[in-house]
Image: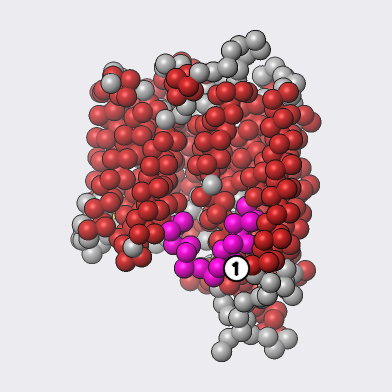
């Protein structure tokens, strides 16, 4: 019994599921965490903060932020205490980490950094944006963490007791399971043809892309198994979440997926700038191919959906010039469906990798086959939490469409904590990473692998697959 | 349990450079994983193409 409460792995499950269970009260119309802070994209800082459920919780955004901090301090503090850490040091360290990391996330939501669609550019009155999406806040958190970790080592040491990137990551992944379960349930209302073809298209992402990237990384660039597996998932599957889930599954160090995730976010911006324009130029007669291509090629959720929206607008504009008025949103739906299906299979992929790594890859020569108990001992437990949350929410959504509204409210609450655990992870990684070594020797070569794989074959295989499955499909005409 | 204590895993974070790690050639099991994944991907792709065009021959 003691082992269920003695490791970060199990405590990630308990905390993740605790947040998930509290959010489930929304199914009965009860909002227990509606006070959680919601960070809006902002130009005016006074409008940056809100709460998730202002109807049930009429509290100002900054109060929501303080409550969110206290809540996270308490739930992680309980875990820290039971695991035998120094609670006082943990609480002080966590406090600094939380507020600095949140400041980074808030900065990342500044409109000139985050906005990435023409509609939002217009809304905020902007002529220029870095188009990082709000996920740019992750990079800022990492950079600030790196600065503190490398130039203020005394302060970084002071925070050490609460610098727990692996724990934060795994907790976030458990919570993520709920959100993806709801998204999966919602897809049933989509057009069957798009749904089915989107499902077909992801076969390529998992089985073809992943194997190719892993091979290129291992064989040509001589990366280790740990880096290659996470890199393959980050580049080929679904960026940030996939790299992190894979790292957990193969027990990689937390720094590995975080560095890869940073590259993913940066490359997604490049893709967002180039691909929609390219699609509009060469695929304006194949609108659904263009939409699906965005979902397959652009790696972060935010950038993929934004690319789909831009592609939708650009191609409909071109078609309108020729007198064809296609309905809005169908290309975006192809992008979103493809991307969401990719997201949904992250857990299964992590599960498969965990089994392969445990039973085969990490098995020493001459070592006997790993027994069932050893597989269980080595198995990353947070994957169980992820699946539990995923399956419960999928079941809820499929059992009664009427419950989907409550389910969406539930994930609205739990996702606040998922994002914050991600931010804490990026910042914590910065604190414990050696900046000079990273930039001198590591991340540059990873960027080369990324560029070679992305522009060498991922984009073009993705285009070919999109063409095979969506060729000839066009959105309905405006009535 | 084979899980590392938090303190040791944290210390391991200090060594972050991918190239600083000794190169280990592709293991036979990795080659098998890569080949199996690719073959399965291509075979499934062909099956799904047939199914897709059988179930949904037209557009919307």
Q: Give the number of callouts.
A: 1
Picture coordinates of residue A467, whole percent (x, y): 73, 63
- Decide if residue A180 is on the left or right side of residue B14: left
Q: Is residue A154 above or below residue A333?
A: above
Which sits in the foreground, A57 or A204? A204
Indicate the quadrant where residue A104 lies: top left
Residue A128 in sight in this render: no
Which sits in the foreground, A185 or B49? B49
Which sits in the foreground, A118 or A35? A35
Residue at position x 35%, y 59% in the image: A399
- Decide if residue A441 is on the left or right side of residue A78: right
Residue A330 in sight in this render: yes
- Decide if residue A188 is on the left or right side of residue A404: right
Query: Which residue is label 1 attached to?
Result: A193
In the image, which residues are magenta? A183-202
Q: Secondary structure at mark 1?
A: helix
Residue at position x 33%, y 63% in the image: A400
Q: Is residue A31 above or below residue B56?
A: above
Indicate the quadrant where residue A72 lies: top left
Q: Could you tell me what secondary structure mostly forms the magenta stretch?
A: helix
Q: Is residue A448 above or below residue A154?
A: below
A446 part of magenta stretch: no
Q: Is residue A257 above or below residue A376?
A: below
Picture coordinates of residue A58, whole percent (x, y): 20, 61
Picture coordinates of residue B13, whole percent (x, y): 52, 22
Residue at position x 62%, y 77% in the image: B60
């Amino acid at each position: 019994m003691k082992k269920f409460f003695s490791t970060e792995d199990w405590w990630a499950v308990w905390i993740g599921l605790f947040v998930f269970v509290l959010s489930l009260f929304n199914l009965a119309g009860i909002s227990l965490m509606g006070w959680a802070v919601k960070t809006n994209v902002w130009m005016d800082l006074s409008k940056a903060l809100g709460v998730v459920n202002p109807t049930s919780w009429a509290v100002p955004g900054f109060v929501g932020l303080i409550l969110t901090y206290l809540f996270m301090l308490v739930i992680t503090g309980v875990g820290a205490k039971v695991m035998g850490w120094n609670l006082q040091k943990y609480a002080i360290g966590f406090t600094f980490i939380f507020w600095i990391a949140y400041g980074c996330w808030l900065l990342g939501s500044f409109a000139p950094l985050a906005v990435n669609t023409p509609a939002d550019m217009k809304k905020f009155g902007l002529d220029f944006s870095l188009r990082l999406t709000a996920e740019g806040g992750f990079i800022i958190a990492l950079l600030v963490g790196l600065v503190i970790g490398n130039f203020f080592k005394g302060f970084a040491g002071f925070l050490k007791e609460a610098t727990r990137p692996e724990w934060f990551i795994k907790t976030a992944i458990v919570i993520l399971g709920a959100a993806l379960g709801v998204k999966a349930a919602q897809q049933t209302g989509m057009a069957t043809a798009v749904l089915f073809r989107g499902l077909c298209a992801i076969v390529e992402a998992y089985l073809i892309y992943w194997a190719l990237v892993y091979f290129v990384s291992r064989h040509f660039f001589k990366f280790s198994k740990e880096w290659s597996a996470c890199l393959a998932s980050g580049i080929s599957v679904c960026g940030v979440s996939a790299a992190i889930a894979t790292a957990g599954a193969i027990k990689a160090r937390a720094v590995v997926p975080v560095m890869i995730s940073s590259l993913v976010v940066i490359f997604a911006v490049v893709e967002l700038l180039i691909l929609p324009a390219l699609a509009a130029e060469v695929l304006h007669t194949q609108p659904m191919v263009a939409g699906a291509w965005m979902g397959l090629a652009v790696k972060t959720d935010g950038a993929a959906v934004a690319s789909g929206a831009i592609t939708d607008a650009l191609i409909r504009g071109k078609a309108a010039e020729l007198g064809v008025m296609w309905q809005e949103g169908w290309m975006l739906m192809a992008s979103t469906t493809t991307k969401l299906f990719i997201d949904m299979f992250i857990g299964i992929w992590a599960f498969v990798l965990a089994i392969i790594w445990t039973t085969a890859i990490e098995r020493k020569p001459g070592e006997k086959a790993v027994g069932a108990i050893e597989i269980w001992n080595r198995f990353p437990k947070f994957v169980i939490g992820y699946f539990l949350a995923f399956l419960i929410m999928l079941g809820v959504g499929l059992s009664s469409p009427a419950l989907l509204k409550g389910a969406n409210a539930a994930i609205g609450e739990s996702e606040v904590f998922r994002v914050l655990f991600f931010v804490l992870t990026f910042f914590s990684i910065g604190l414990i990473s050696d900046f000079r070594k990273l930039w001198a020797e590591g991340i540059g070569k990873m960027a080369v692998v990324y560029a070679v794989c992305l522009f060498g074959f991922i984009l073009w295989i993705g285009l070919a697959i999109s063409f095979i499955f969506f060729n000839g499909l066009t959105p309905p005409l405006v009535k | 349990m084979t899980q590392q204590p938090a303190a040791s895993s944290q210390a391991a974070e200090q060594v972050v450079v991918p190239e600083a790690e000794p190169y280990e050639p592709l293991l036979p099991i990795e080659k098998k994983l890569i080949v199996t994944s690719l073959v399965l991907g291509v075979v499934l792709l062909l099956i799904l193409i047939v199914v897709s065009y059988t179930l949904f021959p037209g557009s919307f």
